[in-house]
Image (cartoon, rainbow, N blue to C red):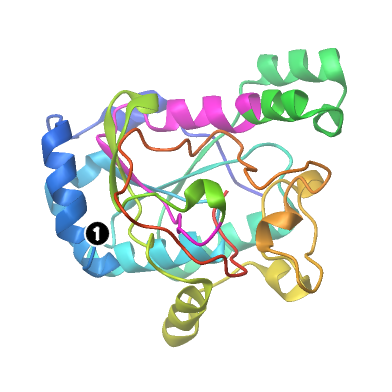
């Protein structure tokens, strides 16, 4: 396997000046793109932010759709991902297929070895089963901190989040201001899509997808924290299944500070982004 972590210093080369957006413009853009296609939002973002725009994906079906759309608009689009150190081998196999299919460099960011060592020494390799706090501590070290490094120097990042994935995502907007990562723009072009919309696009455009979908998985993350879903379960039931409650998040996607007005979502079985 030839996957390597990319240093953040290398990402600053030949980038245009920062093009941050203010709160008022975020509001206008969210309204402007709410009824428009994901491709329209991506085309605008690629033009606006250039190399300071990054596609962030865990290579689930939603993220693969966003990647495919963006690549069709700009074959040199930047793609980043987080290797937590606990991913299933099928994820790396898909990364290899993506590189071959799209001729893209996938920038891979890993947790700091010292932080992982301290985490495991304190709670053991599977501390996430002990409590929600322990699981969130693991997610912070293996996901949240690497993402902060991955987004250093970016002005905008793109996700595969959808409103029908979970109650905690039901009010996301297509354009948001991400204060967690220094006030950069967060784009969710598939926010209004359904799980069926995602797979219709995958089928129509022959988009590569994760092999674990064929084994009953509907939402895929770290191997110890993901299982196939049972009939009648929602997709997020397969993530951190030993925890109670609907708001299962790892900390990568916190609720936006600006709520979407007057919008809810039906609770379909929905797979999707970490």
What residue is shown at x 84% (from left), y 27% (from top)? 127
Residue 19 screen position, x and y as percent: 13, 34
Question: Which residue is at the front of the view, 131 or 118?
Answer: 131
Instruction: Tell me if residue 76 comes above or below residue 257 in the rendering.
Output: below
**Quarter location, residue 53:** top left
Residue 182 screen position, x and y as percent: 31, 23
- Residue 30 in view: yes
What residue is shown at x 51% (from left), y 78% (from top)? 196
Residue 48 screen position, x and y as percent: 13, 47
- Residue 21 in view: no
What residue sits right under mark 1 in the picture?
42
What residue is shown at x 48% (from left), y 32% (from top)? 147
What residue is shown at x 39% (from left), y 26% (from top)? 180
Mark 1 Cα shell of 10 Å, populated few (<14), some (14-19), many (≥20)? many
Q: Is residue 214 left or right of residue 20?
A: right
Where are the magenta residues, as a range? 140-165
């Amino acid at each position: 396997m030839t996957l390597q972590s990319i240093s953040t210093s290398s990402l600053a080369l030949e980038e245009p000046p920062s093009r941050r957006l203010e709160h008022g413009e975020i509001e206008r853009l969210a309204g402007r793109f709410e009824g428009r296609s994901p491709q329209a939002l991506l085309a605008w973002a690629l033009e606006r932010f250039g190399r300071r725009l990054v596609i962030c994906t865990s290579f689930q079906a939603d993220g693969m759709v966003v990647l495919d759309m963006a690549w069709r608009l700009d074959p040199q689009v930047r793609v980043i991902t987080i290797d937590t150190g606990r991913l299933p081998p099928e994820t790396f196999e898909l990364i290899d297929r993506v590189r071959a299919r799209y001729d893209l460099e996938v920038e891979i960011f890993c947790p700091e070895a010292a932080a992982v060592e301290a985490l495991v020494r304190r709670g053991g390799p599977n501390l996430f089963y002990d409590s929600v706090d322990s699981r969130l501590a693991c997610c912070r070290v293996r996901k949240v901190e690497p993402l902060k490094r991955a987004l250093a120097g970016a002005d905008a990042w793109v996700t595969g989040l959808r409103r029908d994935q979970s109650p905690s995502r039901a009010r996301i907007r297509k354009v948001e201001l991400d204060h967690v990562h220094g006030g950069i723009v967060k784009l969710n072009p598939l926010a209004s899509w359904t799980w069926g919309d995602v797979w219709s696009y995958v089928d129509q455009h022959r988009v590569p997808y994760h092999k674990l979908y064929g084994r009953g998985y509907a939402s895929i993350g770290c191997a110890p924290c993901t299982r196939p879903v049972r009939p009648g379960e929602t997709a997020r039931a397969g993530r951190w299944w030993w925890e109670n409650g609907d708001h299962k998040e790892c900390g990568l996607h916190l609720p936006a500070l600006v709520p979407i007005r007057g919008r809810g979502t039906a609770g379909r079985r929905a797979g999707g982004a970490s």
